[in-house]
Amino acid sequence: MAETQEKILYISTCGDENLDKASFPWVLASAALAMDVEATIVLQSNAVVLAKQGAADALPPAGGLPPLKKLIADFVELGGKIRVCGPCIKERGIEESDLIAGAQVTAAAQVNIAAMESDAVFTY
């Protein structure tokens, strides 16, 4: 019988208004990927602004961590999954075509399913 891969879901609600809180899901999720744990980050509320192309480019580093632009790029390069709240981007005037490579729009039911299928869920 094959072992199932461990999964962690990170739900992020902070964007450029709280760079410390916005940075940590990316750090932890990348560490999970390096440990061969499947990691998905769901961006909700103001965190969706981070998925807009170019939005993280000029943000300063926070909490002694690398800049968000690098944290996001590293997560994507390691094979992480980014899911973005559809109503949240609509509210902020962000089109699906404005999203960074690898980001996919998601809805409530899909987030619930991902949470139920995960071994752990972290919320920031």
Image: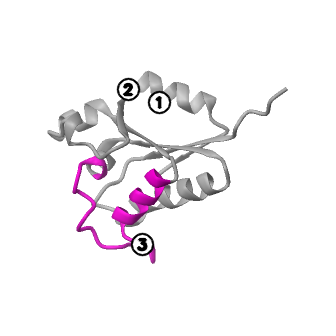
Image coordinates for residue 10, horizontal then vertical, percent: 51, 46
Gap in angstroms between the C-alphas marked 3 and 1: 28 Å
Q: Residue at x 69, y 40 (%)?
A: 6
Tag 2 secondary structure: loop
- Counting labels gives 3
Left or right position of 48 against 31 = left
Q: Position of residue 3 (x, y in %)?
A: 79, 33
Give the color scheme: rainbow, by chain, secondary structure or one colour: one colour
**Mark before the other along the chain sequence, 3 or 1:** 3
87 and 52: which one is in front?
A: 52
Mark 2 and mark 3: span between their CA atoms?
30 Å
Label 1, residues with CA under 10 Å away: few <14, some 14-19, many ≥20: some
Q: Amino acid at mark 1?
A: Val
Q: Position of residue 51 (x, y in %)?
A: 30, 48
Q: Give me the disc on residue 107.
A: 2
Q: Which residue is mark 3?
A: 66
Q: Is residue 116 magenta?
A: no
Q: Residue at x 45, y 77 (%)?
A: 64
Q: Residue 65 is drawn in which quadrant?
A: bottom left
Q: Are marks 1 and 2 in contact (CB under 8 Å)?
A: yes
As drawn, the label of residue 32 is: none
Residue visible at 26% across and 43% down in the picture: 99
Most extreme residue toward the top is 109
The residue carrying pointer 2 sits among few (fewer than 14), some (14 to 19) or many (20 or more) residues within 10 Å by Cα, namely: few
Q: Which residue occupies the foreground of this view, 10 or 103?
A: 103
Residue 111 disc label: 1
User: How many neighbours does mark 3 have within 10 angstroms: few (below 14), some (14-19), or many (20 or more)?
Assistant: few
**Which structural element holds mark 1?**
helix
